[in-house]
Image (cartoon, rainbow, N blue to C red):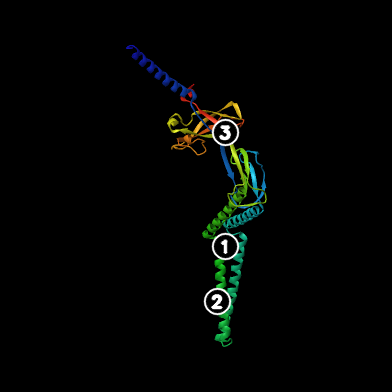
């Protein structure tokens, strides 16, 4: 009896060591396993301007390329506005070019001719006034006639001054302020063209990435407001499984960690994945977990991106199981 106690202690210690070894090695062997659903990036696409839908070029389930036109608005009014903007810009540019060139030789010659004519009229008016003055002093012309001659002389002098100033303006060309104002008007007109061109681009919906049309929300002939979804597309190159890892195991998860993904649709196939998101705060298990025991646990959200499914066999909405590899497995 006295020799059995040490033996029992040895056996118990050995069993505990074996249990710890099995626990640690079994944990490394199986890693972390969780379940979720295949999800993908989905974009709801609408027009950047309001209008009436003229055409929707895709159906649900169609594959689309990045930049492909998916829908168009009625472009009649937009095209008319674009044409008006172009015409206005061309007129503004022509006027600016005219001002920058200055006066034409014909305009200068015309102004010189007008000044010569004004000088001749002034000479004639001066001679008439002098003659009338002489007659008036000799009693041969009335005071009224002298006043009329003086009025004609003053008018001729004013016209000669105006013609000289006009010639000077024509020779100098447009003022600096006029040219600057026209340049500003030309820039404004060009901006109008760019705005109209933007409206033309905004009257079309283009795919931001390659994918699959998941929903066709509207039909041709409907009038839609800015941003109202017309079609939605899925990015099949950005699929993932959202899983939840218990708080006591989150230390075994890190960004970039390799994962294996399986689905009931192809039970004999395994798809590669990688952890791309790890929540920084814990939460209670989402309510869609079936048992009360599981729902009261604190868990962390983990996002595992699908990286090894080139044939897109994992469909969006398909239930999937995820196994996160242990560090020892990743290093092998």
Which of discs 1 and 3 lies nearer the camera? The answer is 3
Q: Quadrant of residue 128?
A: bottom right
- Left or right? Give the position of 13 relative to 92: left
Q: Quadrant of residue 269?
A: top right
Residue 69 pos. (x, y %) = 64, 43
Q: How crowded is the residue under tag 1: few (<14 C-alpha within 10 Å), some, or many (20+)?
A: many
Q: Which residue is mark 2?
A: 154
Which of the marked residues, 1 or 3, is nearer the chain's N terminus? Answer: 1
Residue 185 pos. (x, y %) = 56, 57
Q: Residue at x 47, y 22 (%)?
A: 26
Is residue 24 shown above or below 224? above
Residue 221 pos. (x, y %) = 67, 51
Mark number displayed over residue 43: none
Q: Which residue is mark 1?
A: 170
- Left or right? Give the position of 241 relative to 203: left
Mark 1 to mark 3 CA distance (whole Å): 84 Å
Q: Which residue is mark 3?
A: 319
Which of discs 3 and 2 lies nearer the camera? The answer is 3
Quick check: marks 1 and 2 in contact, CB under 8 Å?
no
Residue 25 pos. (x, y %) = 45, 21
Is residue 332 shown above or below 203? above
Which of the marked residues, 1 or 2, is nearer the chain's N terminus? Answer: 2
Q: Secondary structure at mark 1?
A: helix
Mark 3 to mark 2 CA distance (whole Å): 103 Å
User: Which residue occupies the foreground of this view, 28 or 181?
Assistant: 28
Which of the marked residues, 3 or 2, is nearer the chain's N terminus? Answer: 2
Q: How crowded is the residue under tag 2: few (<14 C-alpha within 10 Å), some, or many (20+)?
A: some
- Left or right? Give the position of 179 relative to 23: right
Which of discs 1 and 2 lies nearer the camera? The answer is 1
User: Which residue occupies the foreground of this view, 3 or 312?
Assistant: 3
């Amino acid at each position: 009896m006295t020799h059995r106690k040490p033996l029992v202690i040895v056996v118990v210690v050995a069993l505990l060591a074996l249990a710890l070894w099995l626990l640690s090695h079994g944990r490394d062997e199986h890693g972390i396993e969780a379940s979720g659903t295949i999800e993908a990036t989905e974009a709801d696409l609408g027009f950047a301007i309001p209008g009436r839908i003229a055409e929707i070029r895709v159906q649900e389930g169609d594959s689309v390329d990045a930049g492909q036109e998916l829908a168009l608005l009625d472009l009649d009014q937009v095209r008319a506005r674009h044409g008006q903007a172009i015409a206005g810009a061309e007129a503004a540019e022509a006027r600016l070019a005219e001002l920058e060139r200055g006066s034409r030789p014909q305009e200068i010659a015309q102004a010189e001719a007008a000044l010569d004519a004004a000088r001749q009229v002034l000479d004639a008016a001066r001679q008439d006034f002098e003659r009338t003055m002489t007659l008036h002093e000799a009693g041969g012309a009335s005071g009224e006639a002298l006043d009329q001659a003086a009025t004609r002389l003053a008018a001729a002098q004013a016209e000669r001054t105006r013609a000289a100033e006009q010639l000077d303006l024509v020779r100098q060309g447009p003022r600096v302020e006029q040219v600057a104002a026209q340049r500003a008007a030309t820039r404004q007109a060009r901006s109008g063209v760019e705005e109209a061109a933007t409206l033309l681009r905004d009257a079309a919906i283009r795919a931001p990435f390659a994918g699959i049309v998941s929903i066709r929300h509207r039909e041709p002939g409907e009038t839609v407001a800015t941003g109202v979804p017309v079609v939605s597309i899925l990015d099949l190159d950005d699929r993932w499984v959202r899983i939840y890892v218990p708080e006591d195991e989150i230390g075994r998860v890190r960004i970039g960690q390799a994962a294996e993904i399986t689905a009931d649709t192809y039970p004999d196939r395994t798809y590669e994945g990688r952890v791309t998101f790890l929540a920084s705060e814990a939460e209670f298990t989402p309510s869609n977990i079936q048992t009360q025991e599981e729902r009261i646990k604190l868990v962390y959200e983990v996002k595992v991106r699908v990286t090894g499914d080139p044939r897109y066999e994992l469909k969006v909405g398909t239930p999937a199981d995820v196994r996160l590899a242990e560090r020892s497995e990743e290093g092998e």
